Protein backbone atom coordinates (compact mmCIF):
# COMPACT_ATOMS: atom_id res chain seq x y z
CA UNK A 1 0.00 0.00 0.00
CA UNK A 2 1.59 3.22 -1.21
CA UNK A 3 -0.60 5.50 0.90
CA UNK A 4 -2.07 7.16 -2.19
CA UNK A 5 -5.78 6.56 -2.64
CA UNK A 6 -7.85 6.93 -5.76
CA UNK A 7 -11.59 6.76 -6.24
CA UNK A 8 -13.48 5.31 -7.90
CA UNK A 9 -11.66 2.13 -8.80
CA UNK A 10 -13.76 1.59 -11.92
CA UNK A 11 -15.88 3.98 -13.93
CA UNK A 12 -18.06 3.14 -16.91
CA UNK A 13 -19.69 5.95 -18.83
CA UNK A 14 -20.86 6.96 -22.28
CA UNK A 15 -19.33 9.13 -24.96
CA UNK A 16 -19.95 12.83 -24.46
CA UNK A 17 -20.20 12.55 -20.69
CA UNK A 18 -18.07 14.16 -18.00
CA UNK A 19 -16.40 12.37 -15.09
CA UNK A 20 -14.28 13.32 -12.10
CA UNK A 21 -11.48 11.18 -10.73
CA UNK A 22 -10.26 11.80 -7.22
CA UNK A 23 -6.85 11.33 -5.63
CA UNK A 24 -5.66 11.70 -2.05
CA UNK A 25 -1.88 11.92 -1.73
CA UNK A 26 0.21 10.38 1.02
CA UNK A 27 0.17 12.28 4.25
CA UNK A 28 2.68 15.12 4.03
CA UNK A 29 3.11 15.00 0.25
CA UNK A 30 2.55 18.34 -1.45
CA UNK A 31 2.97 17.27 -5.08
CA UNK A 32 0.36 15.36 -7.05
CA UNK A 33 0.88 13.99 -10.55
CA UNK A 34 -1.61 12.46 -12.96
CA UNK A 35 -0.71 9.83 -15.56
CA UNK A 36 -2.69 8.00 -18.21
CA UNK A 37 -2.01 4.40 -19.19
CA UNK A 38 -3.53 3.33 -22.49
CA UNK A 39 -2.79 0.44 -24.79
CA UNK A 40 -1.60 2.60 -27.66
CA UNK A 41 0.17 5.43 -25.82
CA UNK A 42 1.59 3.56 -22.84
CA UNK A 43 2.10 5.50 -19.61
CA UNK A 44 2.04 9.24 -20.16
CA UNK A 45 2.36 12.19 -17.82
CA UNK A 46 -0.66 14.49 -17.84
CA UNK A 47 -0.22 17.19 -15.22
CA UNK A 48 1.57 18.10 -11.97
CA UNK A 49 0.27 20.17 -9.08
CA UNK A 50 2.32 21.40 -6.16
CA UNK A 51 0.69 22.80 -3.04
CA UNK A 52 -2.41 23.85 -4.93
CA UNK A 53 -0.70 25.37 -7.95
CA UNK A 54 -0.30 23.90 -11.41
CA UNK A 55 3.38 23.30 -11.95
CA UNK A 56 3.66 21.48 -15.26
CA UNK A 57 1.52 20.12 -18.05
CA UNK A 58 2.27 17.15 -20.20
CA UNK A 59 0.19 15.50 -22.89
CA UNK A 60 -3.12 16.60 -21.44
CA UNK A 61 -6.05 17.27 -23.75
CA UNK A 62 -7.93 20.55 -23.51
CA UNK A 63 -11.04 18.54 -22.59
CA UNK A 64 -9.22 17.46 -19.43
CA UNK A 65 -8.53 19.63 -16.42
CA UNK A 66 -7.32 19.16 -12.89
CA UNK A 67 -7.08 20.97 -9.62
CA UNK A 68 -5.56 20.51 -6.21
CA UNK A 69 -7.53 21.62 -3.18
CA UNK A 70 -6.34 23.19 0.09
CA UNK A 71 -6.42 19.77 1.78
CA UNK A 72 -4.07 18.66 -1.04
CA UNK A 73 -6.39 16.12 -2.61
CA UNK A 74 -6.67 16.43 -6.36
CA UNK A 75 -9.35 15.87 -8.96
CA UNK A 76 -8.97 15.14 -12.65
CA UNK A 77 -11.96 16.20 -14.72
CA UNK A 78 -12.53 14.58 -18.10
CA UNK A 79 -15.24 16.03 -20.31
CA UNK A 80 -16.79 15.34 -23.72
CA UNK A 81 -15.50 11.82 -23.35
CA UNK A 82 -14.49 9.81 -26.40
CA UNK A 83 -13.92 6.10 -26.83
CA UNK A 84 -10.19 6.75 -26.96
CA UNK A 85 -10.22 8.18 -23.43
CA UNK A 86 -10.73 4.68 -22.05
CA UNK A 87 -7.62 4.05 -20.00
CA UNK A 88 -6.19 3.52 -16.56
CA UNK A 89 -5.57 6.84 -14.82
CA UNK A 90 -2.93 6.93 -12.11
CA UNK A 91 -2.27 9.52 -9.50
CA UNK A 92 1.12 9.78 -7.81
CA UNK A 93 2.42 11.93 -5.00
CA UNK A 94 5.77 13.05 -3.68
CA UNK A 95 7.02 15.24 -0.89
CA UNK A 96 7.94 18.10 -3.20
CA UNK A 97 9.20 18.62 -6.73
CA UNK A 98 12.79 17.66 -7.25
CA UNK A 99 13.09 16.72 -3.63
CA UNK A 100 16.01 14.76 -2.34
CA UNK A 101 13.67 11.84 -1.76
CA UNK A 102 13.08 11.87 -5.50
CA UNK A 103 10.35 9.27 -5.50
CA UNK A 104 6.77 9.30 -6.63
CA UNK A 105 4.31 6.93 -4.98
CA UNK A 106 1.52 5.67 -7.18
CA UNK A 107 -2.09 5.01 -6.33
CA UNK A 108 -3.96 1.90 -7.52
CA UNK A 109 -5.49 3.74 -10.47
CA UNK A 110 -8.99 4.39 -11.79
CA UNK A 111 -10.02 2.34 -14.79
CA UNK A 112 -12.23 4.41 -17.08
CA UNK A 113 -14.29 2.70 -19.75
CA UNK A 114 -16.12 4.88 -22.26
CA UNK A 115 -18.85 3.07 -24.21
CA UNK B 1 13.46 15.26 -25.03
CA UNK B 2 14.09 12.62 -22.42
CA UNK B 3 13.11 9.08 -23.30
CA UNK B 4 13.36 5.47 -22.17
CA UNK B 5 13.71 2.43 -24.41
CA UNK B 6 13.26 -1.07 -23.08
CA UNK B 7 13.18 -4.44 -24.71
CA UNK B 8 9.90 -5.52 -26.22
CA UNK B 9 8.06 -8.42 -24.75
CA UNK B 10 6.59 -10.69 -23.96
CA UNK B 11 9.45 -12.52 -22.35
CA UNK B 12 8.74 -16.12 -21.40
CA UNK B 13 11.07 -18.00 -19.08
CA UNK B 14 11.00 -21.16 -17.02
CA UNK B 15 11.07 -20.95 -13.25
CA UNK B 16 14.59 -20.52 -11.82
CA UNK B 17 15.92 -19.10 -15.09
CA UNK B 18 18.10 -15.97 -15.22
CA UNK B 19 16.31 -12.77 -16.21
CA UNK B 20 17.62 -9.70 -17.99
CA UNK B 21 15.38 -6.92 -19.26
CA UNK B 22 17.35 -4.29 -21.12
CA UNK B 23 16.72 -0.59 -20.65
CA UNK B 24 18.50 2.44 -22.07
CA UNK B 25 17.69 6.09 -21.62
CA UNK B 26 18.25 9.48 -23.18
CA UNK B 27 18.25 12.46 -20.86
CA UNK B 28 19.84 15.81 -20.23
CA UNK B 29 21.71 15.87 -16.98
CA UNK B 30 21.60 12.97 -14.57
CA UNK B 31 18.10 11.68 -13.98
CA UNK B 32 17.04 9.24 -11.31
CA UNK B 33 16.23 5.81 -12.72
CA UNK B 34 13.54 3.37 -11.65
CA UNK B 35 12.01 0.02 -12.33
CA UNK B 36 8.29 -0.25 -11.64
CA UNK B 37 6.27 -3.47 -11.68
CA UNK B 38 2.59 -3.90 -12.46
CA UNK B 39 1.03 -7.21 -11.43
CA UNK B 40 -2.13 -8.32 -13.23
CA UNK B 41 -5.07 -6.10 -12.34
CA UNK B 42 -3.03 -3.92 -10.00
CA UNK B 43 -1.37 -0.53 -9.96
CA UNK B 44 2.27 0.46 -10.26
CA UNK B 45 4.73 -0.51 -7.57
CA UNK B 46 8.24 0.80 -7.30
CA UNK B 47 10.58 -2.17 -7.57
CA UNK B 48 13.95 -0.44 -7.25
CA UNK B 49 15.70 2.82 -7.96
CA UNK B 50 19.10 4.45 -8.42
CA UNK B 51 19.76 8.14 -8.15
CA UNK B 52 23.33 8.52 -9.42
CA UNK B 53 25.89 6.85 -11.64
CA UNK B 54 27.19 3.45 -10.48
CA UNK B 55 24.40 3.14 -7.89
CA UNK B 56 22.90 -0.32 -7.72
CA UNK B 57 19.24 -0.63 -6.84
CA UNK B 58 18.01 -3.94 -5.47
CA UNK B 59 14.81 -5.44 -4.11
CA UNK B 60 13.21 -8.90 -3.94
CA UNK B 61 16.21 -10.44 -5.70
CA UNK B 62 16.07 -7.96 -8.59
CA UNK B 63 19.03 -5.68 -9.31
CA UNK B 64 19.85 -2.86 -11.70
CA UNK B 65 22.96 -0.69 -11.96
CA UNK B 66 22.96 2.91 -13.18
CA UNK B 67 25.52 2.97 -16.02
CA UNK B 68 26.18 6.50 -17.18
CA UNK B 69 28.73 5.52 -19.81
CA UNK B 70 26.26 3.26 -21.61
CA UNK B 71 23.11 5.16 -20.46
CA UNK B 72 21.63 1.88 -19.32
CA UNK B 73 19.74 0.47 -16.35
CA UNK B 74 19.21 -3.21 -17.12
CA UNK B 75 17.05 -5.27 -14.76
CA UNK B 76 18.38 -8.66 -13.65
CA UNK B 77 17.32 -11.51 -11.41
CA UNK B 78 19.25 -14.69 -10.85
CA UNK B 79 16.33 -17.08 -10.42
CA UNK B 80 12.81 -16.05 -11.37
CA UNK B 81 9.63 -17.40 -9.82
CA UNK B 82 6.12 -17.81 -11.19
CA UNK B 83 5.06 -14.96 -8.90
CA UNK B 84 7.37 -12.60 -10.82
CA UNK B 85 5.02 -12.72 -13.80
CA UNK B 86 4.05 -9.10 -14.39
CA UNK B 87 4.74 -6.09 -16.59
CA UNK B 88 8.00 -4.27 -15.83
CA UNK B 89 8.52 -0.60 -16.65
CA UNK B 90 11.85 1.15 -16.81
CA UNK B 91 11.53 4.85 -16.02
CA UNK B 92 13.43 8.03 -15.38
CA UNK B 93 12.51 11.10 -13.39
CA UNK B 94 13.32 14.28 -15.20
CA UNK B 95 15.27 16.97 -13.40
CA UNK B 96 13.48 19.82 -15.11
CA UNK B 97 10.52 21.79 -13.81
CA UNK B 98 8.07 19.15 -15.04
CA UNK B 99 9.45 16.71 -12.50
CA UNK B 100 7.58 14.01 -14.38
CA UNK B 101 8.38 10.35 -14.70
CA UNK B 102 8.99 9.11 -18.23
CA UNK B 103 8.22 5.45 -18.72
CA UNK B 104 9.34 2.88 -21.22
CA UNK B 105 6.64 0.90 -22.99
CA UNK B 106 6.83 -1.98 -20.53
CA UNK B 107 7.96 -5.59 -20.85
CA UNK B 108 5.51 -8.36 -20.06
CA UNK B 109 7.17 -11.28 -18.29
CA UNK B 110 5.67 -14.77 -18.17
CA UNK B 111 7.27 -17.36 -15.91
CA UNK B 112 6.34 -20.98 -16.55
CA UNK B 113 6.36 -23.51 -13.68
Image (cartoon, grey):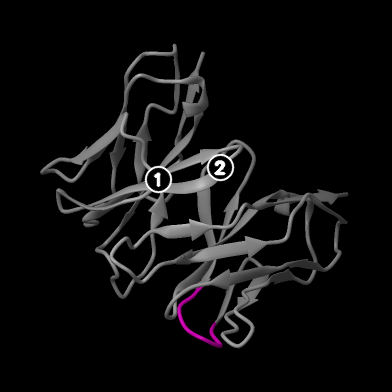
Pointer 2 local density, CA inside 10 Å: few below 14, some 14–19, many at least 20:
few
What is the CA distance from the residue labelled 2 to the residue labelled 1? 10 Å
Residue B28 place in picture, x, y as percent:
44, 76
Q: Nearer the viewer, residue A63 or B79?
A: A63
- For image coordinates 35% across by 40% down, the residue present is A5
Q: Are marks 2 and 1 in contact (CB under 8 Å)?
A: yes
Which secondary structure lies at badge 2?
loop
Residue A100 place in picture, x, y as percent:
31, 75
Q: Which chain is disc 2 placed on?
A: A
Residue B73 place in picture, x, y as percent:
62, 74
> In the displayed structure, would residue A103 be above or below residue A110?
below
Q: Which secondary structure type mostly characterizes the magenta part of the structure? A: loop
> In the displayed structure, would residue B87 be above or below residue A101?
above
Which secondary structure lies at badge 1?
loop
Answer yes or no: is residue A76 visible: no
Q: Which residues are magenta?
A: B50-55
Q: Nearer the viewer, residue B46 or A57?
A: A57
- For image coordinates 64% across by 52% down, the residue present is B106
Is B98 magenta? The answer is no
- Answer with mark 2 or mark 1, whichever residue precedes in sequence: 2
State the residue position of label 1: A59
Residues tagged by mark 2 and mark 1 found on one chain of the structure? yes
Which quadrant holds residue B25?
Answer: bottom right
> In the displayed structure, would residue A75 be above or below residue B98?
above
State the residue position of label 2: A41
Answer yes or no: is residue B21 visible: yes
Q: Position of B47 compared to A51: left or right?
A: right
- For image coordinates 29% across by 70% down, the residue present is A98
Amino acid sequence: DSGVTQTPKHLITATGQRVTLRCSPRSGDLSVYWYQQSLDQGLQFLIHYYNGEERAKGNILERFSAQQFPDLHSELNLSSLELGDSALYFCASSVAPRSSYNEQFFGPGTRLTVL
Amino acid sequence: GDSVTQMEGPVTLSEEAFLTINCTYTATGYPSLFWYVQYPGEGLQLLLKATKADDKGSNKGFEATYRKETTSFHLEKGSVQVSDSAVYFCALRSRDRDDKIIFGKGTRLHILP
